[in-house]
Amino acid sequence: MIALKNIDKFYDSKFQRTFVLKDINLEVNEGEFLSVMGPSGSGKSTLLNIIGLLDTPSDGEYWLYDTNVAQLNEKNRGKYHRDFVGFIFQAYHLIEEMTVYENIETPLIYKGVKQKDRQAMVADMLDRFGVVAKKDLYPQQLSGGQQQLVGIARAIVGKPKLLLADEPTGNLHSKQGEMIMETLKELHTEGMTIIQVTHNDKFAAYGERIVHLEDGLLKQQ
Amino acid sequence: MNILKAIYRNLKVSKVSTTFNFVGLITAFTVFILIMMYVWTEYHFDMYHKDANNIYRLEIMSPEKDKTSVYMMGLTKDVIKEQLSDVVATTVYMPWGKWGEILFEWETNDTKLTSYEDYAISDKHLTEVFTFDFLHSTSSAPLSEPNSAIVSDAFAVKFWGTHDVIGKTFKTNGEEYSVTGIFRTPPKNSLFNEPVILSFPTNGWLAESYKTWGVVNFPEFIKVKSGVAVHDLQARINDIDILKEKHSFYEKSGVKAEIIARPLAELRFAKDVAENPLFNTNNKSSVNTLFSVGLFILIIALLNYVNFATATLPKRLKNIGVTRILGNSSRQIFITGILESVLISGVSFFVALGLAVAVNDEFGIKLFEYPLDFRASVFVIFLLFAVAIAVGIIGAIVPAFSSIKVLPMDAVKKRHAIARQTSRGWLTVVQFTATIILIAMSVLTIKQVDFMKNRSLGFDKENVMVIYPTDNLLKNLDAFKTAIQQSSMVKNVALSGGVPGVPSNMEGFRFNDESYQTWLWYVDSKYMEMMNFNIIEGRAFLQDSDAEQYSVIVNEEAKRKYRCEIGSHLIKYDREGNQLKYQIVGVVEDFNFASLREKVEPFAFRCINENFRGWVNIKLDTEDVKSAIGFITQEYNKFSPNQPIRYYFLDDKLNLLYSQEDRQIGMISLFSMLSLIISVLGILGLSIFTSQYRTKEIGIRKINGATVIEIVTLLNRGFVKWIIIAFVIATPLAYFAMTKWLENFAYKTALSWWIFVLAGFVALIVAVLTVSWQSWRAATKNPIESLKYE
């Protein structure tokens, strides 16, 4: 499904070129659960951003199925975000001024889903994650774990093919973290392709395959 | 629907900014609407007449005079109409009520009533030149019949309680008139604010003098065909032989007098007309200044708006970034941003419009001389609405572009330059420059008016009661004088042909083979002493001496200009051509017989020993003015029973000369306060944001030992710097503006340095208090909480 070929990401300053990612070659199959591990500063988030089309590589090819999407235009990128991929962040990034319900609902609005259908889909999510009672609360009123659950709900409500998670358990303690990872495992069992970035061994092991990123270079295992 | 929800959410993101934006915009728009409506009305006075662009007023421009006169010789307009085929109609319009209202007597429901009314005299061609909205009229030229009159609807209701008044009669000035037309009261911004217009008399002095060349008395208007150029028109008018001949009287050292045709559109601002109180005028520069102030305030509010929009951007960028990751398109974000802004400015505009209409009645008269007519200028309101929307769009453009340029991940992680821009120094500078200038102007205006009202005019104006003379009173004047002087409350009584503050009589003299026109008052022998005029050379008029009727006392300016002396003779010719000689017996110190806007012109007093038709001046010598008035009224009624007493106090009347400036004070003070409020809003908002952004920094400083005072000072320092820069820029600008404004006055107050310092000081204090308040709140927060915030 995903093939990265010779991906480079660098920044040029006055005297030097700093490589964040160097010659990355990576393939991800549909339905895989991949963990990308590495220390801080190794470029994990950048890699995830490139895969999620939130960043463009300086060089190389990014093949999604049989299209090179490395330099996709704005409109198509929007489509990609709406229809294909869902994001989970370490800092959840929920919109504080919206209720739990509205947060989960948001991607569906951009997809153009009708009100009735939206209600049904959001209700499903609330149910699944056990946060029905909290649907009219604001993110600040939830615990970290609950916020992340909402984040996941938001990310998958639109039934994306691909789920990208950037340190999903980074702000949570181990018990909450486990709960999140269990949820991700469940989703994987249901057929979702998941790529997560983490520096926690235990949680990385939830994935089928682990790759290591160090100083911008990929080491397979 | 979703866009509205999104907008509502965006507004909630920063409630502070949203509130300030609304308050600021509503305030600014209200003021903006009021000012622009006023300016538009001022520039469109009388344009409601049909063919307004083709109507002109005739005036005479005499050589060596800086003002024209509206008094034409009667037959001028007839000659012009006869000889110039381009002239389609002419009329005479004399708003004589402005010299003094006259008594009207009428009957309604079998009761006889009387009232003093403002009035005008015109001829049957009035309706050919000007447009009146008649409710009823006997014909298209209702003033054709002798002794006919047309009245306003307000007048009809006042007199007879109905609009059905055709045929009703009233008596005035010894004649009976019959109503032949009732018209809707013209808009407030009109030449015609007299409620009753009498037809031109067919006999009597007025009718005779109309036909006499050599008598200038008649304001005249002409209407021409479309497409006539004014210069061409004037040239042809001045080329008419008989007019050239009759106006040669004005010739001076080879320079002829000229007849001017002044377009209707320019009458409102025609300042260089000698008989200005006859026709309502206003200062063009004041109106233009007000226009600038209006724009100013709008710009300040717009700057505030942009200020807040950019300051709240980082917070909103985060959300925008998140939604973009969730699939929102740039186009949608941009449109939402603009829409949000347009919504805010649109809603603010409507609230402001409501406010403007609400305060119009109360403030309209206080500030503008008349309440604004919103219904008549709907077109202007639409225009202003468009401006408001434009403001909304302009305010949103830059932030909207920023919001789509920043990459979503950067927005989310707040990794962009915008987050770091917290000081909008130059915006503060502009706002406070405007505020300081306005404050300085209001201080100056107050100072100038105070100066004019309190300046010694060269005579005593206090406690002088002036009574309008009626025929009966004049017949029994001596008895009246004796009667009232019985009371100790009355110090003195004297007659005068003129009163300070009311422009009146001019007469021509010859001296040293030159012709001069001088302001001249006839007075009795007691007047000058009673009013305490300062005679600096020669002597005063002798009491009760018939010989004095050939004496004149001139003022210093006359002496200077005509180069005459005590003992010089001024020559006049009577109707038969006999020479009359008047000897100068005294010189009086220059005094201000008009407003202090004017320079003192040559003036002369002549003494008349017997009672003549003039103002009865009574000098009171008591604190109990009410009793004095009561007593005098009582005595008056004994001698003039059927005509109620009409009087005023001289100092009050003189203060009225400055009613325009009083209004200006009101306006400028209001606007400087507004400017201050808007600037304070700006600086308050900024300091809130700044302290929010620097919360972490403040927390750390406190942990490291900084005191609250030190932190407040730290946060203040940035703002104080901008205020000082604003002061430096504002001072020369204010100085320039103030100097220009003072040019309107012949007698000016000093442009003291403390005015500027005061203005700057006020601005500084207000700014410092505002910022300190906010900084203090930020500085007293528990530092641990500030650090947790991040």
Image (spheres, coloured by chain):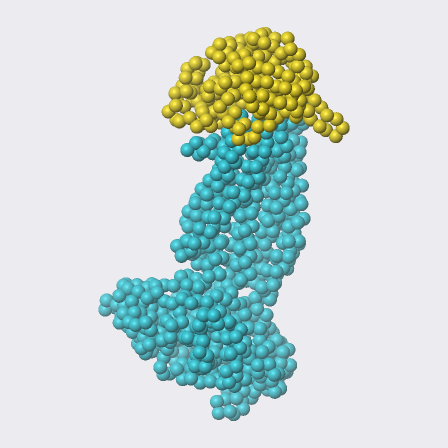
Chain colours: A yellow, B cyan
Outermost residue on the front side: it is: A66
Q: Position of residue B33 (x, y in %)?
A: 47, 51
Q: Is residue B609 left or right of residue B601?
A: left
Name which residue lies at 50% across and 82% down: B240
Vertical comparison of A195 with B764: above or below: above
Q: Where is residue A88 in the image (x, y as percent from the top left)?
A: 54, 19
Name which residue lies at 65% across and 27% down: B697
Vertical comparison of B560 with B709: above or below: below
Asked if one can make out residue B264 in the rendered structure from this viewpoint, the answer is yes
Q: Where is residue B257 in the image (x, y as percent from the top left)?
A: 55, 80
Counting labels gives 0
Asked if one can make out residue B275 in the rendered structure from this viewpoint, the answer is no
Vertical comparison of A119 with B630: above or below: above
User: Who is closer to the viewer here, B136 or B488?
Assistant: B136
Name which residue lies at 54% across and 84% down: B248
Vertical comparison of B27 with A185: above or below: below
Q: Is residue B161 left or right of residue B615?
A: left
**Quadrant of the frame with the N terminus of chain B:** top left
Outermost residue on the right side: it is: A15
Q: Which quadrant of the view contains residue B90?
A: bottom left
User: Who is closer to the viewer here, B739 or B38?
Assistant: B38
Q: Position of residue A218 (x, y in %)?
A: 66, 14
Q: Is residue B57 left or right of residue B470?
A: right
Outermost residue on the left side: it is: B110
User: Who is closer to the viewer here, B596 or B219?
Assistant: B219
User: Who is closer to the viewer here, A206 or B174?
Assistant: A206
**Quadrant of the frame with the C terminus of chain B:** top right
Name which residue lies at 36% across and 83% down: B203
